[in-house]
């Protein structure tokens, strides 16, 4: 599987070795060859460039993305996540679902943001390709779609000029509160599970987790 990913990435023209390695990692994490993830990947890199910023390794930047649930090309969000380094687990990738391929990339320290919108034509082209019309819309999983159908869509964003893939607004001022994370653990007095202290509810002076608090009250 990974060999196949390597071969696909290597066949893309115009990427240097580092860029190929990076895209290869993104494809491995995403898991399948599609058109959505690479569109997000290119859009994420474009957003960083417009913001004049490096890929986020800590928690100083944030993405608020507007793809939704239960529609095609949601994979876009994975590409944005990987390219920008604003990941779900670090708490710096938030979804505000609108069924749109738009996102904000926010530099919390600088108080600046850019808004990225995927161009209509790029999206329409992806949605009219056989990958969607002949396979995905008929319930075929991306991994079961023949390579000759899936690969052109994967490679396409890399063959286009950046301005033909995305529209970027900003940078503009965008203030976001930077909260200090909680570093303490407490144990739920009902189930005994350990939780982050900032999620503990107090009941009769004892910490209770969110799972147990209703149960406790209902009794
Ligand atoms: Zn995908
Ligand atoms: Zn509990």
Image (tube, grey):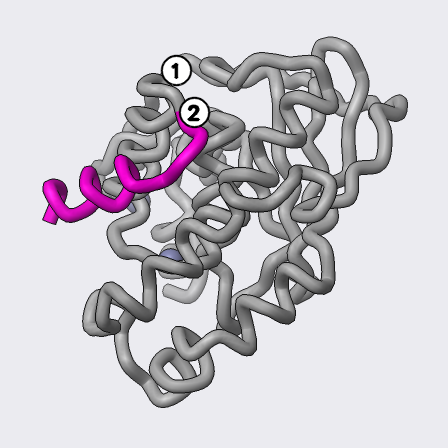
Q: Residues within 10 Å of mark 1 (few under 14, many from 20)?
A: few
The C terminus, quarter of image: bottom left
The answer to whether mark 2 and mark 1 are in CB contact below 8 A is yes
Q: Position of residue 48 (x, y in %)?
A: 63, 23
Q: Residue 20 appears in which quarter of the rendering?
A: top left
Q: Which residues are magenta?
A: 1-15
Residue under pointer 2: 197
Tell me, yes or no, whether the highlighted magenta stretch contains residue 3: yes
Q: Residue at x 48, y 75 (%)?
A: 129
Q: Is residue 205 visible?
A: no
Q: Residue furthest front?
A: 13
Label at residue 98: none
Near-viewer residue (160 or 50): 160
Query: Is residue 112 in view?
Result: yes
For image coordinates 77% across by 44% down, the residue present is 167
> How far across and down, in percent of the image, does residue 90 sit?
45, 27
Query: Would you say 99 lies left or right of 39 here?
Result: right
Mark 2 vs 1, N-terminal side: 1
Mark 2: which secondary structure?
helix
């Amino acid at each position: 599987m990974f060999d196949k990913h390597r071969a696909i990435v290597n066949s893309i023209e115009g990427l240097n070795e580092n860029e190929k390695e990076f895209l290869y990692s993104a494809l491995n994490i995403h898991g399948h060859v599609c058109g959505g993830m690479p569109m997000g990947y290119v859009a994420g890199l474009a957003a960083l460039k417009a913001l004049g910023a490096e890929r986020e390794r800590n928690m100083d930047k944030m993405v608020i993305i507007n793809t939704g649930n239960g529609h095609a090309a949601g994979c876009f969000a994975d590409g944005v996540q990987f390219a920008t380094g604003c990941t779900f687990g670090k708490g710096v990738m938030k979804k505000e679902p609108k069924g749109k391929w738009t996102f904000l990339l926010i530099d919390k320290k600088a108080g600046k943001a850019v808004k990225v919108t995927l161009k209509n034509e790029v999206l329409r082209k992806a949605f009219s390709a056989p990958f969607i019309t002949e396979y995905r819309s008929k319930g075929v999983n991306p991994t079961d779609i023949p390579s000759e159908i899936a690969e052109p869509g994967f490679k396409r964003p890399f063959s286009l000029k950046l301005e033909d893939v995305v529209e970027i607004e900003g940078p503009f001022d965008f203030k976001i509160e930077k909260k200090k994370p909680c570093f303490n653990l407490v144990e739920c007095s009902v189930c005994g599970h350990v939780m982050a202290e900032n999620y503990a509810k107090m009941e009769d002076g004892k910490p209770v987790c969110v799972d147990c608090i209703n149960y406790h009250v209902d009794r």
